[in-house]
């Protein structure tokens, strides 16, 4: 019996330990978080939305998703400004067992430590829950809790290994979708049908048949569309010569680009950037309002709602087609192709939010990226006007608006409101925000020049149009409360606003001097949140009325 050897000693796998675990919250001041650890990292999304960027790859982050980041991999977490992120970051270490190995035995490598590929798992509430429990009890008060932590940590490791195994098994299955995604990402490289067929796991001849069935184009036609549409994007931006553009999109010179360009469009690339677009698609409704104001009705709007499309003083849309932004990429591309779209206007942030990418849509038409958070509505308006060659019309509208803006500012600066600090409080189902220089804050603080709470004013001075809002705790209300409070309540998914009672019935709310004086205004969400020229103009009029008491 003395020669019996424990079966545990024979595994020779590394021992996993938790190097560290952090709870990370994003804010309007810190919307980005960089990660570059020498050990593997597991990220769990507890709340909010955003994306993770690693080199040229982008992953959408939603509540319940988990992402594995290999050691020495630099990534950046970017939070959605309207849905701040709360994530847990677990750094994992794997150490060799301390005991010497039997003769001839070898230490097995850690699958987690040797994995060099970022892996994304979209819906893992159990993993997220275990990460949260591990963080909450990260400082155990007794050995019993310490052992529980060890169990939970190894449950996380087990779940991760299981997901990686599932992912690996699924990744072994060849697919047409993977080959098309490869083509969309590598269109500027030398790509053969044989290579694409190899990725799809079918013969080259059968690949062409399947490709045509899925896309409506042959592989060579699809590749040509990707290259020509990217060339159009570069021509629109005016950022390179024809020779440079040709080489960037995968053609050997400008002459070959010109031939392909003429075959596809019937015109030479040299005159393309002077073309006036007629059939334009927009992603989300704010950009549709910009186009309508410029006298061009979008052919297609990709959006989850039309509620923020304001057309006051404009002709109502006649033929505009809506596609739900939650539709599949294939459904969206099909509708855009059927409607002969010449240009797509979108913000990368919005595309990622709905699981889409520039690469997926580029086969349909060139895509003009108008950044959403980096600039304000006036710059959005100017950029879109320049795209469709209606810059003079935009400048005239802005000049007229600035006259109205100055008149409103002069009037309001003579009112009692000019002496007050105005707070814009937004109540969402699970969070509180104080708004800055966008949405209603754009009119209150920028157009009318009213005073923001000191902490908000500091950020407006520092960030300007990019400062959207700051999340706060209920206990912080007094730190941001002004002489007058404007309140906007977002309903929950069922349309209820009962969650606002938590704020309105709290001692923090009722102790505010503005509340005690009844200097509180409840504003309508649909009237004050939209962020486009037509809506901003209407908000300016409403603000004057609000502060005049009419």
Image (cartoon, grey):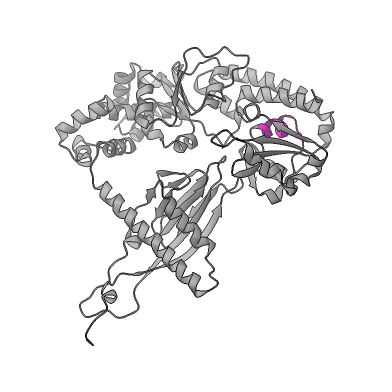
Q: In the image, is residue 446 part of the stretch drawn in magenta?
A: yes
Instruction: Name which residue lies at 64% across and 42% down.
Output: 433
Span colored in magenta:
440-453
**Going 68% across and 34% down the picture, which residue do you hit?**
441
Left/right of residue 62 with respect to residue 405 in the rendered view: left
Could one spot residue 238 in this view of the protein? no
Q: Is residue 461 above or below residue 104?
A: above
- 232 sits left or right of 507 in the view: left
Quarter the N terminus occupies:
bottom left
Q: How many marks?
A: 0
Question: In the figure, residue 256 lies in which quadrant?
Answer: top left
Q: In this view, which residue lies farthest toward the bottom?
A: 2
Residue 104 point in image, percent of width and height: 20, 77
92 or 374, nearer to the observer: 92
Quarter of image, res 278? top left
Q: From the top left corner, tell me how far across and down residue 294 is, in percent.
A: 56, 17
The picture places residue 284, in percent across and down from the top left corner, at 50, 28
């Amino acid at each position: 019996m003395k020669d019996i050897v424990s079966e545990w000693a024979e595994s020779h796998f590394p021992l996993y330990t938790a190097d560290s675990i952090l709870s990370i919250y994003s804010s309007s001041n810190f919307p980005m978080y960089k990660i570059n650890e020498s050990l593997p990292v597991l990220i769990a999304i507890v709340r909010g939305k955003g994306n993770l960027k690693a080199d040229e790859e982008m992953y959408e982050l939603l509540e319940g998703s988990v992402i594995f980041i290999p050691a020495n991999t630099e990534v950046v977490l970017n939070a959605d400004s309207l849905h701040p992120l709360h994530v847990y970051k677990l750094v994992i270490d794997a150490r060799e067992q301390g005991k010497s190995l039997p003769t001839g035995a070898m230490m097995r490598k850690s699958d987690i430590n040797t994995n060099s590929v970022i892996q994304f798992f979209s819906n893992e509430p159990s993993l997220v829950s275990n990460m949260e429990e591990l963080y909450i009890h990260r400082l155990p008060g007794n050995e019993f809790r310490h052992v529980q932590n060890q169990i939970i940590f190894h449950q996380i490791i087990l779940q991760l290994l299981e997901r990686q195994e599932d992912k690996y098994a699924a990744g072994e299955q060849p697919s047409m979708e993977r080959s098309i995604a490869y083509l969309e990402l590598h269109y500027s490289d030398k790509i053969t049908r044989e290579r694409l067929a190899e990725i799809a796991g079918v013969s080259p001849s059968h690949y062409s048949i399947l490709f045509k069935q899925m896309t409506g184009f042959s592989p060579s036609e699809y590749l040509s569309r990707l290259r020509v549409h990217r060339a159009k994007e570069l021509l629109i931006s005016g950022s390179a010569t024809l020779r440079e553009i040709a080489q960037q999109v995968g053609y050997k010179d400008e002459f070959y680009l010109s031939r392909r360009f003429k075959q596809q469009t019937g015109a030479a690339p040299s005159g393309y950037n002077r073309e006036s677009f007629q059939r334009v698609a927009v992603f989300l409704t704010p950009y549709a309002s910009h186009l309508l104001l410029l006298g061009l009705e979008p052919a297609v709007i990709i959006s989850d709602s039309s509620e923020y499309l304001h057309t006051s003083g404009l002709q109502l849309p006649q033929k505009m087609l809506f596609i739900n932004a939650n539709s599949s990429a294939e459904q969206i591309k099909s509708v855009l192709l059927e409607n002969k779209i010449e240009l797509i206007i979108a913000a990368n942030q919005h595309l990622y939010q709905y699981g889409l990418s520039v690469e997926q849509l580029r086969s349909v038409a060139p895509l003009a990226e108008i950044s959403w958070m980096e600039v304000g509505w006036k710059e959005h308006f100017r950029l879109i006007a320049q795209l469709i060659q209606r810059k003079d019309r935009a400048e005239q509208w802005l000049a007229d608006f600035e006259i109205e803006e100055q008149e409103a500012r002069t009037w309001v600066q003579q009112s009692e409101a000019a002496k007050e600090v105005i707070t814009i409080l937004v109540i969402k189902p699970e969070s509180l925000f104080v708004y800055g220089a966008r949405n209603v804050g754009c009119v209150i603080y920028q157009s009318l020049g009213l005073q923001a709470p000191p902490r908000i004013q500091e950020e407006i001075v520092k960030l300007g149009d990019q400062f959207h809002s700051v999340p706060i705790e209920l206990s912080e209300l007094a730190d941001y409360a002004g002489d007058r409070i404007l309140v906007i309540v977002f309903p929950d998914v069922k349309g209820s606003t009962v969650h606002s009672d938590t704020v309105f019935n709290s001692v923090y709310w009722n102790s505010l001097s503005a509340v005690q004086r009844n200097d509180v205004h409840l504003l309508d969400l649909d009237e004050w949140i939209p962020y486009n020229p037509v809506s901003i103009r209407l908000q300016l009029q409403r603000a004057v009325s609000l502060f005049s008491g009419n």
